[in-house]
Amino acid sequence: MSSAVSPTLAPPERWWRSRTVRRFCRHRLAMFGVAMIVLLTLACVFGPYLLPYDELFIDLRARFAPPLTGWHFFGTDPLGRDLAARLFNAGRISLLVGFFAMLMSTMIGTFIGVLAGYYGGKIGAVLMRITDAFLSFPSIFLLLALAAFIKPSPFTITAIIAVTSWMEVARIVSAEVRSLRERDFIQAARMLGLSNRWIMFRELLPNAIGPIIVAATLTVARAILLEAYVSFLGYGIQPPLPSWGNMLNGAQQYLGSAPWLAIVPGVAITLAVTSFNFIGDGLRDALDARSDLS
């Protein structure tokens, strides 16, 4: 065994290796999800610059214009604002909230899961009981309770979603670390005198990265859905700042006369959530060495 201890003792199987990539690319639903997320992201980033109206422009003469009316491709809302412009700008916020909530919740859950899985015993039991206590509350009620007492903004909504979404990641990471901590390369690391912090974050964590990536992908979908739910109920992103959730909130009283006001953001939410779930399924199958998608 080499005496150098700076490199990791057992480099993890990198998920981007050719066999894994081929398995992922053969997963048709996952590739559909990737294509949809790329299209949604490009539309939200560049779409507002390609439209003749911005999301705050009011044209009272064009109130309730149906889709494909002139330059209003998705129609207009009760104030005559262009629905496409509002949809794309709302998508920026909803996707950013989902992405950053995923980052925050994944970091929290991974940290707690690594500590609980590596140390086990009383430390692991206490951390897992805290996780179980959070899981015992329905996440949507916990989210609404926190949102009701905090001034809503994109940052606070992101933080609240992250605080109520880390538990599943923690349990996944804890189980994975417990299965890895008795492996030979961890025993070798201990014999070399490497610190617990080094072993946890430079040896165990890289080898558990596969399940973390899958959980993170699914967390994005869940965060987008939670933001839409909270904003729909009026506790999330507040107008005039648009989000897909508060667009649905403003459309509920016009379902009979102007159904496109609800259909357009509803389809966007469905596409985003479904696509991230498809990507998560594809990553799970691709990272599973026993999986054969051919």
Image (cartoon, grey):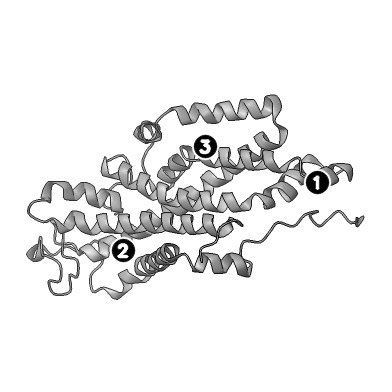
Does residue 211 appear anywhere in the picture?
yes
Residue type, numbered disc 1? Asp
Task: Give the camera-side residue of 266 and 185.
Answer: 185
Residue sitting at x 15%, y 67%? 67
Q: Secondary structure at mark 2?
A: helix
Q: Label 3, on which residue?
A: 167
Q: Position of residue 293 (x, y in %)?
A: 51, 63
Label ID, residue 184:
1
Give the total number of marks visible in the rendering: 3
Residue sitting at x 68%, y 38%? 178
How far apart in space, not on screen, are marks 1 and 3 (Cα)? 29 Å
Q: Label 2, on which residue?
A: 88
Of callouts 1 and 3, which one flags the residue occurring earlier in the amino acid sequence?
3
Q: Which label sits in the foreground, 1 or 3?
A: 1
Residue type, numbered disc 2? Phe
Of callouts 2 and 3, which one flags the residue occurring earlier in the amino acid sequence?
2
Of callouts 2 and 1, which one flags the residue occurring earlier in the amino acid sequence?
2
Q: Position of residue 83 (x, y in %)?
A: 21, 62
How far apart in space, not on screen, are marks 2 and 1 (Cα)? 51 Å
Q: Secondary structure at mark 3?
A: helix
